[in-house]
Image (cartoon, helix red, strand yellow):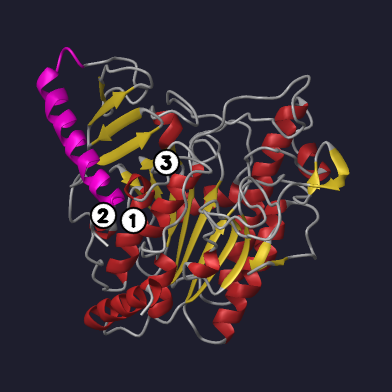
Amino acid sequence: MTIRKLFAATISLFLFLGASQSTERPNIILCMADDLGWGDTGYNGHPVLKTPNLDRMAEQGIVFNRFYSASAVCSPTRGSCMTGRHPARYGIGGANDGHMLEEEITLAEVLKEKGYTTGHFGKWHLGTLTTKEKDSNRGKPGDSTHYAPPWEHGFDVSFSTEAKTPTWDPMKDPENPDKHYRTYYWIGEETKASENLEGDDSRVIMDRAIPFIEGAVEEEKPFFAVIWFHTPHNPVIAGKDYREMYSDLDEDHQHYYGCVTALDEQMGRLRETLSDLKVEKNTMLWFCSDNGPAAKLGGPGKEPGARQRGTTGPYRGRKGSLYEGGVRVPGLLVWPDAFPEPKTIDTACVTSDYFPTILQTLEIPLPDRPYDGISLLPVIRGTIKGRPKPIGFDFRDQLAWSDSRYKVYKPRDSDRFELYDLAEDPGESHDLAKEHSKILETMRDQLDQWREDCATSRKLKEY
């Protein structure tokens, strides 16, 4: 029996033991922007950006004020969504680093065994998608080192890129539109998409996700759709109509704001589709970003799409930093059947929480291994106050450990640890390490224990 068949059998056993008595299984959609800052939405107070559909989600659903990406860059965060585990446990330390291991159990695999049809649309970034040709950042002929496509990790349908694409005309080089950009959309093993690849990339992605959803509803099957936009990661390019919405601003802002508004438009289109299909009430629709906004680029000599103009709002740091601005991101959930009234959650939540939350919803026991996420159902219902388990971060020689109030942070290239009271000082302006040395010591000990646990996981001792 192969490893994958063994794990499929294991998942089936868990499902058998924990199957829900209810026949009404919610549909599940995980949407994610790429490099969208906490402040890059109207509902979080941006004075210019037009995001009416995200704002409407915030008005009607659940707003997570302290929602975190599991890392300060994309690949580790994406891995956390799929597994409920910090990717330090299985070797995805940063972008283009490692891949989704065969031994990991993904949400798609669990839900597929539960009878869901599963689809991935957009940016994958958890491994290469071809071994036959040059593609994106790491795919190349004859190299299967990091080959780990979505169709080998539980997804029935894929429309996926290994990494970034331009946010407009995704297959064209923005510096030379007659040339192909260095990546492809893959729909299966060594099979590339070749049609409907022009215009806004968020629309291109949604053009594949919506028929998948329509097909699942027609077949009366619950669906799990992962929709991971490339916007607003560079190359940042917006179409003319979207740029004109911001015609009084400079070119970089027109493109950045324009492509974010284009993404927002597709979120509205998705919600309208769910409503038309009469499945919006029984659908868990999540939205977040994979990390904070990228460093500001642009100007003479820069790639035309490198127009990062995102904001972290009041928070310190940006993408790549474990200060709040690098990992605190927009977080939303709309699920009318379960939570018909809007509410705001101030408890710290993280992308690793998706996996245990969804499994508890379906009354499926967690497979036996360490998890960094928690189920958010008791948090949303108000049956627990605060977060029972701190959130750990480990990225490029930076460390952080964050509980319901305090946060320990170790900067890059330093042995010094800082301590912040996020309840009183969310902007991390006042280091309390000397004033509250006992709190710092206790949290450092917890952080050390967590890192040792992750190191044990990396040795595959739990598989």
Judge left or right: residue 358 versus residue 455.
right
The secondary structure type at the circle numbered 3 is loop
Q: Quote the CA–CA distance across marks 2 and 3.
A: 17 Å
Q: Amino acid at mark 2?
A: Tyr
Whether residue 25 is visible here, answered yes or no, is: no
Q: Quote the CA–CA distance across marks 1 and 2.
A: 6 Å
Q: Is residue 355 above or below residue 396?
A: below
Q: Is residue 256 above or below residue 430?
A: below
Label 3 belongs to which residue?
Answer: 93
Counting from the top left corner in percent of width and height, residue 398 is at: 36, 28
Q: Main secondary structure of the magenta part?
A: helix
Q: Is residue 436 magenta?
A: yes
Residue numbers of the magenta segment: 433-460
Whether residue 185 is visible here, answered yes or no, is: yes
Counting from the top left corner in percent of width and height, residue 433 is at: 20, 16
Label 2 belongs to which residue?
Answer: 371
Counting from the top left corner in percent of width and height, residue 78 is at: 46, 51
Q: Nearer the viewer, residue 403 or 322?
A: 322
Q: Is residue 53 magenta?
A: no
Q: Earlier in the sequence, mark 1 or mark 2?
A: 1
Residue 369, by quadrant, is bottom left
Label 1 belongs to which residue?
Answer: 84
Looking at the rendered image, the quarter that the C terminus falls into is bottom left
| Residue beneath the point at 62% across and 50% down | 264
Label 2 environment density (alpha carbons within 10 Å; few <14, some 14–19, many ≥20): some
| Residue beneath the point at 74% across and 25% down | 302
Judge left or right: residue 86 versus residue 297.
left
Residues tagged 1 and 2 counted as in contact (Cβ below 8 A): yes
Judge left or right: residue 264 versus residue 174.
left
Looking at the rendered image, the quarter that the N terminus falls into is bottom left
Q: Is residue 45 above or below residue 16?
A: above
